[in-house]
Image (cartoon, rainbow, N blue to C red):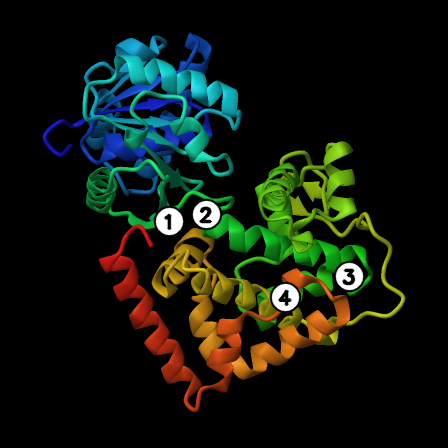
Amino acid sequence: MTENKKVAVIGQGTMGAGITEVFAKAGFEVHAVDNSEAALDRGRSIVAKSTGRAVTKGRMTEEEQAALVGRITYFTDTAEAVADCQLIVEAVFEDLAVKQEIFKTVDAAAPAGAILATNTSSLAITAIAAAVSRPESVVGVHFFNPPVQTLVEVVRTVYSDDAIIADLVELLKGLGKSPVVVNDRAGFIVNALLIPYIGSAINLYENGFATREEIDAAMVEAAGYPMGPLALADMIGNDVCLAVLEKLYDETKNRVNAPAPILTRLVIANMMGSKTGKGFYTYDGFKPTDDRGPIRRPLQSRKAELPDRLVGEYLNNCVKMVEENYASVDAVNTGMREGCRMPNPFDVLKEMTPKRVLEIVEGIYAETGEPGHRPARLLRQLAAADDQAAAIDELQASTAELHASNPRG
């Protein structure tokens, strides 16, 4: 892979063009693919605007910009574009049938040994792999928006060749990325933790727990998160949050992941958030105004229970992910820190203490009776330790060793 510096990126929307730029900046010859000249022009424009900003801010010279752009060749013929590439990254919109057709074309045209990667954030990668003749070559490579972010989730299916996963991880490290390797399940690490946290905040808002401003302020000012969950939902897009929650609920049947009715109604009303000008907040450009929200103010606010209510539930989910052997402590910390700019969850757990988090989660479970709110067994074990901080450190070391020595879990 390191000898062949040719990469194909299929789809030249915001994500695809961003991924194209990442590889071109690293010195790869990139074959940028889309289904029309208009779509390719859009991709060119995205790269030109992004690199132009870098020049203006002094992060890149005009000569470096010209060299980067010169390493990109544009194609409307997918088979021609991938014929001599050892890595193909698909980044089209989230439609399984469309992706499967693209992968069939790539499968027939790409050289032997090529890595066939999809940037999907929500679809089952196993279902894409099953559509081709070499499913062991198919892997998820989930870049975050914008793709210059360091985190990349590398997603392995039941078919995956461990050598291909290892090659891809090394390639991504060479790009300056921080890859975390996980198995193929809904949400991977980041969306499986972030979106239910947002969903819980939406439920609290709809049910009159606190105002949107109280919820968001508590998570920023008291918990130290970069954004409040309702403002974050508007930024991500309420349609995206709804789609991920539906995927998570469909796979897990955990009712805690079921979308709140207000989220569904906002999407029906085309109130997707900042991109449409209205969501949980109303926007002037991309700046929220003080216009009233979609839910009337609560009769009696429970804001005093924030941020512990949301943080406790979120940390319980982080512990469950490790307990289920899906991800190591390091992978969860890396995912949430570099993918969301949130504090390392296990550092927060250590600071709050597992005993305190267990008390919070037991209170939530007693109130709701939802199985999805039941405290993780591992959380109980950590809370019962004589030295809770040392128990977290030991868990971090043991999961790192386990996942390194047994990559298939």
The residue that label 2 is drawn on is: 188
Asked if the residues shown at circle 1 and circle 2 are in contact, with their CB atoms under 8 angstroms apart, the answer is yes
Q: Could you say whether the residue bearing mark 4 is in a helix, strand or loop?
A: helix
Asked if the residues shown at circle 1 and circle 3 are in contact, with their CB atoms under 8 angstroms apart, the answer is no
The residue that label 3 is drawn on is: 211
Mark 2 Cα-neighbour bin, 10 Å: few <14, some 14–19, many ≥20: many
Quadrant containing the N terminus in the rendered view: top left
Query: What's the CA distance linking mark 3 and mark 4?
Result: 14 Å
Q: Could you say whether the residue bearing mark 3 is in a helix, strand or loop?
A: loop
Q: Tag 1: residue type? A: Val
Circle nearer the N terminus (1, 3): 1
Residue 86 in view of the camera: yes
Mark 3 Cα-neighbour bin, 10 Å: few <14, some 14–19, many ≥20: many
Q: Nearer the viewer, mark 3 or mark 2?
A: 2
The residue that label 4 is drawn on is: 310
Q: Tag 3: residue type? A: Thr
Q: Tell me where residue 35 sits by quadrant.
A: top left
Circle nearer the N terminus (3, 2): 2
**Which residue appears farthest toward the bottom when viewing the image?**
386
Query: What's the CA distance linking mark 1 and mark 3?
Result: 36 Å
**Which residue appears farthest toward the left when viewing the image?**
3
Total numbered badges shown on the rendered structure: 4
Percent position of residue 44, x then y? 37, 20
Asked if the residues shown at circle 3 and circle 2 are in contact, with their CB atoms under 8 angstroms apart, the answer is no
Query: What's the CA distance linking mark 1 and mark 2?
Result: 7 Å
Mark 4 Cα-neighbour bin, 10 Å: few <14, some 14–19, many ≥20: many
Q: Nearer the viewer, mark 3 or mark 4?
A: 4
Percent position of residue 86, x then y? 20, 25
Query: What's the CA distance linking mark 3 and mark 2?
Result: 30 Å
